[in-house]
Image (cartoon, rainbow, N blue to C red):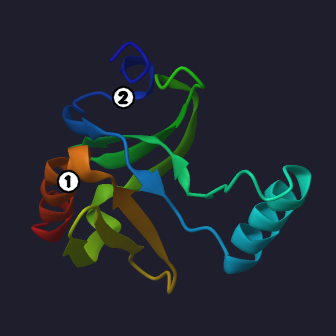
Amino acid sequence: MDLVGPVLREGERVEMACTPNVGTVSVKRQVATAAVASIATAGMLIVAVRPKTRYAVLTNQRLLLFDMAPSGRPAPPLVAELPRPALTSSRFKSALKATFHISMEGDPKSLKMEFPFPGRHDARQLADALARQ
């Protein structure tokens, strides 16, 4: 929480923190990465590309997204801050991984949030918190 403290506004409090994979990876990038790895290793290595893991902090006012250091710990800088009242969650799916989309009022695009198996509970909690506003 040392990372979050300096960016909190007066009266703002943390409700939850989690580490989702945020965004999507295009098919073009997946194919290009797989092809380069296959050529470089003569087919001995298969590479999978996934969205970037972020440290997400939900407060009573905003959703904050921070970078993740190579060590797996949250790191500065603050990548995005989204006003909570303008956010809604939709299309929740849960199997081995849980996914849902976050939409911002007035923006036709949505942000995909993907939680691997161990973080599925966090996915439901975050989606429900954004849905009940």
Please name which of the two marks, 2 or 1, marks the residue nearer to the observer.
1
Q: Identify the residue shown where x is 29% and y is 40%.
A: 18
Q: Amino acid at mark 1?
A: Arg
Residue at label 2? 8
Residue lying at the far right of the rendered structure = 40
Q: Position of residue 75 (x, y in %)?
A: 54, 24
Q: Which residue is mark 1?
A: 120
Q: Quadrant of residue 133?
A: bottom left
The residue at the point 9 percent across, 67 percent down is 132
Residue 126 spot, x, y in % from top left: 20, 55
Q: Residue furthest top?
A: 2
- Give the residue type that dot 2 points to: Leu
Q: Residues within 10 Å of mark 2 (few under 14, many from 20)?
A: some
On screen, 9 above or below 18?
A: above
On the picture, is 40 further left or further right than 28?
Answer: right
From the viewer's perspective, is 65 left or right of 114? right
